[in-house]
Image (cartoon, rainbow, N blue to C red):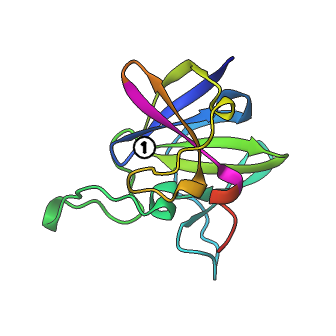
Amino acid sequence: MTSSYLTFILSGRLFGVRLSGAIEILPWRKSRPVPLSYSYVEGLIDYRGTLYPVFNIAQRLGLSKAAPIGFTALEKDQPGPGQSIILLEEKSIPFGIIVDSVVKMAKLEDPSAAPAPEKTPGIEPQYVKGLVVEDDQEVMILDFERLLHAG
């Protein structure tokens, strides 16, 4: 069985989220900081009257990429080229995630049909619903319920 997914890049790796949970793709924007929050909580944005907490998923997953240093480094509150915020809703809870770039919408096999992978290179396996291959590339489908649960 196939479903529609939105695929995106984080730290050079391909991820996917079910399209039915996607609300909007926004260009990166500065969010309002949330005092005393977890380091991966980027802040809050107001979109069409709804407040969305925005999460830095790459930081939460412990993914990193080579960054420029010295005078070429971006300021902390500046987006990288192509960065976006994907607004999502899962189990009636709205939230946003920062991604390096949005790739495309794709029909992918439903990862719930197969068991979740026991090993996922560089990512805790409990945060992954499944791995799907599309165009000879692995697409990692994330479990946002577990990923965004504090702890």
Report whether 114 appears left or right of 20: left
Query: Image point 33% across, 43% down: which residue?
Result: 12
**Which of the 4 image quadrants contains residue 136?**
top left
Q: Is residue 150 magenta?
A: no
* Near-viewer residue (8 or 140): 140
The residue pinned by badge 1 equals: 83
Q: What kind of element bears circle 1? A: loop
Query: Image point 38% across, 51% down: which residue?
Result: 121
Quarter the C terminus occupies: bottom right
> Residue lying farthest right?
92
Residue 83 position within the rendered picture, expressed as x and y whole percent measured from the top left: 42, 43
Residue 11 position within the rendered picture, expressed as x and y whole percent measured from the top left: 35, 49
Q: Which region is colored magenta? A: 137-145
43 versus 5 height, above or below: below
Q: Is residue 144 magenta?
A: yes
147 versus 129 height, above or below: below
Residue 61 position within the rendered picture, expressed as x and y whole percent measured from the top left: 48, 60
8 versus 105 height, above or below: below
* Near-viewer residue (117 or 38): 117
Quarter the N terminus occupies: top right
45 versus 60 height, above or below: above
Residue type at the position of mark 1? Gln
Q: Residues within 10 Å of mark 1 (few under 14, many from 20)?
A: some
* Near-viewer residue (19 or 136): 136
